[in-house]
Image (cartoon, rainbow, N blue to C red):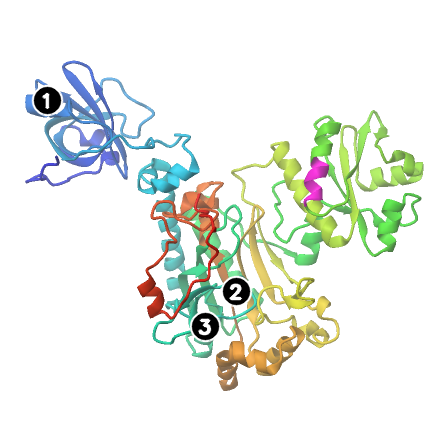
Amino acid sequence: MGEKMGNMRRTHMCGTLRRQNENQEVTLMGWVQKRRNLGGLVFVDLRDTTGIVQIVFDTDISKEAFDKAETIRSEYVIAVKGTVKIRESINKDMETGDVEVFASELKILDEAQTPPIYIKDNDDVSDAMRLKYRYLDLRKPFMQKNLKIRHKTMKLFRDFLDENNFNEIETPMLTKPTPEGARDYLVPSRVNPGNFYALPQSPQLMKQLLMVSGMDRYYQIVKCFRDEDLRANRQPEFTQVDVEMSFVDVEDVININEKLIQRIFKEIKGIDIKLPLKRMTYKEAMERFGSDKPDLRFGYEIVNLSDILTNSGFKAFSGTIADGGSVRAIKVEDGASAFSKKGISKLEKYVKTYKAKGLAWMKVIEDNIESPIAKFLSEEEIKAVASKMDAKEGDIIFIIADKDDVVFDSLGHLRIEVAKKLDIIQKDVYEMLWITEFPLFEYSEEEDRYVAKHHPFTHPMDEDIHLLETEPQNVRAKAYDIVINGDEIGGGSIRINNSDLQTKMFKALGFTEEEANDKFGFLLEAFKYGVPPHGGIAYGLGRLVMMLTEMDNLRDVIAFPKTQNATCLMTQAPAMVTEKQLEELSIALNMKEDKTEDNE
């Protein structure tokens, strides 16, 4: 049973004690990390959120405290009063390793059963167990550190934006379902039977309305919700830092956000980011790296070989080019010996997952080209390829011929896969850049129409507006992403602030006037009354914190995350509700009786 604290009041945190505290009487409280009984002495490692300190129970100092100490176990919650002394044997692995506390008084505040998972960073327990016993998992030092860095990052956002005259304004969680995005989470309305609210996928329309209202600068650290099939590092609810500014164009938004990112990396990582950051157009990023979020920490840039293979006798190449596709390649320096035929076969299977039909290769060995496709190419073509790729002894070239989007997607992923296999990606380097001039539209084969690449309120580049109705595929957007080490950390755009242009945009997207009014009527109504030029950006807070903490999994920077099936193993959410609750909401369930539970 636990004891009352009585007159004991915590004076210090465990991890803060140092040599300068020598001979001070302190009162500490925390969890027992481990206990060692050496006969006349009991040693206890006591842990709180600041760290661990060693407590010594000695029969010569307090027989009562010593006897109690013999009964305590791991994860007991205790209070200890004692005197700080310099340790005879210094422990350089502990921040408090110069000192220990000789206990004169011990109170057991609560006992604990043997925990189902170890409270240590490298416990190797399954993800399912970590999530089921998340409150224990969160006791681990690395998880506590991650959540503190998340807190500090949020505070830096708030401090910087406050200094720059942004107002923090909350927007509603219960809002109207709108199209153009992932599936909404729906909330039934009891007082309006048959009607539903949607949880916001982002506060996009609300922040635009705040600009219409004249707030000038807005931000919010906000929960967003998407009911989509989850992949690794996706959560059904995620946190966005939402920023919007009035009377701005692209340069204004980029300039202030560069300074914000610079501040965060300086304060959290101690890294001086040089401004301005690099910039690259979407077109250049795709052609050089096959991705609109290129990782610049390594090379393996994509090279277009189409011009030298247009008339090749090898129809897999020349036929693809004639059909409007291209032949492109990456070169891996000194990679010839790293990839056997078996290894190359694995890479071929890998690129096929991105719809590539195959993977051709050439190795430069002793000034000769070794390749299964060499017999299909002329000597001049082989030399031209090697020359254009600047291939040297020991290099390997990987070639893909297909439609441009397939070539970019497959080679873009291949360069990352190869870099991982060769372990050349530097973890402690941060390569940041802005990607600009995104396409305004992308074609959806599923819907057989153009859809907005970002959202329907993105402003086209001024010089491309005349192409909206005739060549929508060539219209570029005033949109920009900030990319760090191959991850999109934030993205935004300048918004349309003119009713006529917004109407043209809806028309290009295939919305009738009725559909546009039905879905966005309140915004279009607001747009009749004077709209400032405005734009903004939204950051994925979790992804940024992942980068700052050097974690590989989004779940390691979230206190209570969900599984890939959008379930919570700790609380067992989502759960069934009573018939009475369903009746109050005018909802009837229509479920197959053999539906299996998928909350593993």
Q: Is residue 439 left or right of residue 52?
A: right
Query: Quarter holding the N terminus?
Result: top left
Rendered view: 118 above or below 274: above
**SS category of the residue bearing label 3:** loop
Q: Is residue 16 left or right of residue 281?
A: left
Residue at which label 1 appears: 67
* Magenta span contains residue 349: yes
**SS category of the residue bearing label 2:** helix
Residue at which label 2 appears: 253
Q: Earlier in the sequence, mark 1 or mark 2?
A: 1
Residue at which label 3 appears: 176
In-front residue for pair 235/436? 235
Residue at the (22%, 29%) spot, across then down: 19
Which amino acid, by three-letter code, is at mark 2?
A: Val
Q: Is residue 117 left or right of residue 475?
A: left
Q: Earlier in the sequence, mark 3 or mark 2?
A: 3
Asked if the residue at tag 2 contacts the one at tag 1, i.e. Cβ–Cβ closer than 8 Å, the answer is: no
- CA distance for labels 3 and 2: 28 Å
Rendered view: 20 above or below 488: above
- Expressed as whole percent of the image width and height from the top left, the position of residue 272 reads 48, 46
**SS category of the residue bearing label 1:** helix
- Expressed as whole percent of the image width and height from the top left, the position of residue 357 reads 77, 45
Asked if the residue at tag 2 contacts the one at tag 3, i.e. Cβ–Cβ closer than 8 Å, the answer is: no
